Image (spheres, rainbow, N blue to C red):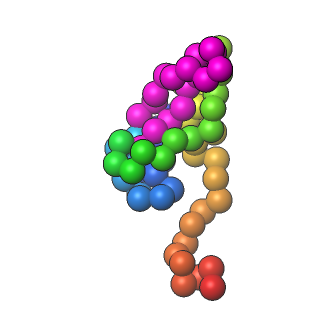
Amino acid sequence: MKARECPFCESQRVETAETEVMGKKVLRIRCMECGAEGPVNYASESTPVAVTNWNRRAEFRSWTEVE
């Protein structure tokens, strides 16, 4: 499974990042262009879970459609 583009800047440069939150290792998907990060996934979960959570979001069409 491949991570979708960044929902903020539409960059394809997204990578899995392992960090630590409150003493626990977590996985996130991170945009290498704008720095946006996906939801926290505990390291006991797999990378595919992190990718699924990153990909799970509402479609953004354009700001003109929001108004």
Which residue is at 52% across, 76% downward? Answer: 62
Name the one closer to the observer, 11 or 19.
19
Q: How many marks?
A: 0
Inspect the magenta stretch and tell me whether residue 21 lies in it: yes
Give the left or right position of residue 62, taking residue 9 as reference. Answer: right
* Magenta-tinted stretch: 15-31
Inspect the magenta stretch and tell me whether residue 18 lies in it: yes
Asked if 15 appears above or below 9 in the picture, the reply is: above
Asked which quadrant contains residue 45, the reply is top right
Give the left or right position of residue 56, taking residue 37 as reference. Answer: right
> Percent x, y for residue 37?
52, 41
Which residue is at 48% across, 47% downward? Answer: 36
> Percent x, y for residue 19?
51, 23
Asked if residue 43 shows in the view, the reply is no
Asked which quadrant contains residue 21, the reply is top right
Name the one closer to the observer, 32 or 55.
32
Asked if 11 appears above or below 21 in the picture, the reply is: below
Which residue is at 48% across, 58% downward? Answer: 8
Q: Residue furthest front?
A: 22
Asked which quadrant contains residue 44, the reply is top right
> Percent x, y for residue 63?
54, 78
Q: Magenta stretch: dominant SS?
A: strand
Which residue is at 58% across, 31% downward? Answer: 50
> Percent x, y for residue 61?
55, 72
Asked if residue 42 shows in the view, the reply is yes
Give the left or right position of residue 11, taking residue 8 as reference. Answer: left
Instruction: Quadrant for the C terminus, please.
Output: bottom right
